[in-house]
Image (tube, rainbow, N blue to C red):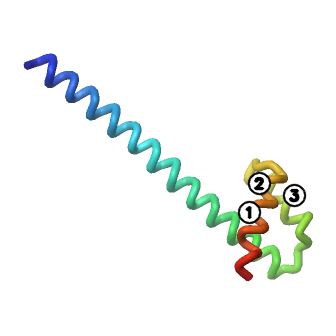
Amino acid sequence: KDVTEQVTKDVTEQVTKDITEQVTKDVTDQITKEGIRIFILSSLEDDIPEERILAKLQKHYHITKEKAEQYYREFTAKI
């Protein structure tokens, strides 16, 4: 019985840890994406050219040019 209780406790702790890590990653990703959206739209309001926006996204968010372009297309398609 003690072994079963310990295994149950260990599995529960690991599952809790895994879920917490995944939720933290998901929330962080959502917040980052929202920050990128706000940055792009604000930059456009200030008449900053697309190439400069893309360069700043790469620099400040440590993403590739392709990823920056993907975000740019995604968020500018809605305006």
Bin the neighbour count of mark 2 within 10 Å (Cα to Cα): few under 14, some 14-19, many 20 and up. some
Asked which quadrant contains residue 43, the reply is bottom right
Q: Looking at the rendered structure, which numbered label has been put on residue 43? A: none
* Residue at the (40%, 44%) spot, across then down: 20
Instruction: Describe the element under mark 3 as helix, strand or loop.
Output: helix
- Circles 1, 2 touching at the beta carbon (< 8 Å): yes
Q: Is residue 39 above or below residue 68?
A: below
N-term-proximal mark, 3 vs 2: 3
Q: Which residue is mark 2?
A: 67
Asked which quadrant contains residue 45, the reply is bottom right
Q: Nearer the viewer, residue 35 or 3?
A: 3
Q: Is residue 20 above or below residue 38?
A: above
Q: Position of residue 50 (x, y in %)?
A: 89, 69
Q: Position of residue 62 (x, y in %)?
A: 76, 48
- Circles 3, 1 touching at the beta carbon (< 8 Å): no
Q: Amino acid at mark 3?
A: Ala
Instruction: Describe the element under mark 1 as helix, strand or loop.
Output: helix
N-term-proximal mark, 3 vs 1: 3
Q: Looking at the rendered structure, which numbered label has been put on residue 71? A: 1
Asked which quadrant contains residue 36, the reply is bottom right
Would you say 14 lies left or right of 7 here?
right
Q: Is residue 19 above or below residue 36?
A: above
* Residue at the (15%, 22%) spot, across then down: 4
Q: Position of residue 29 (x, y in %)?
A: 58, 54
Would you say 31 lies left or right of 73 here?
left
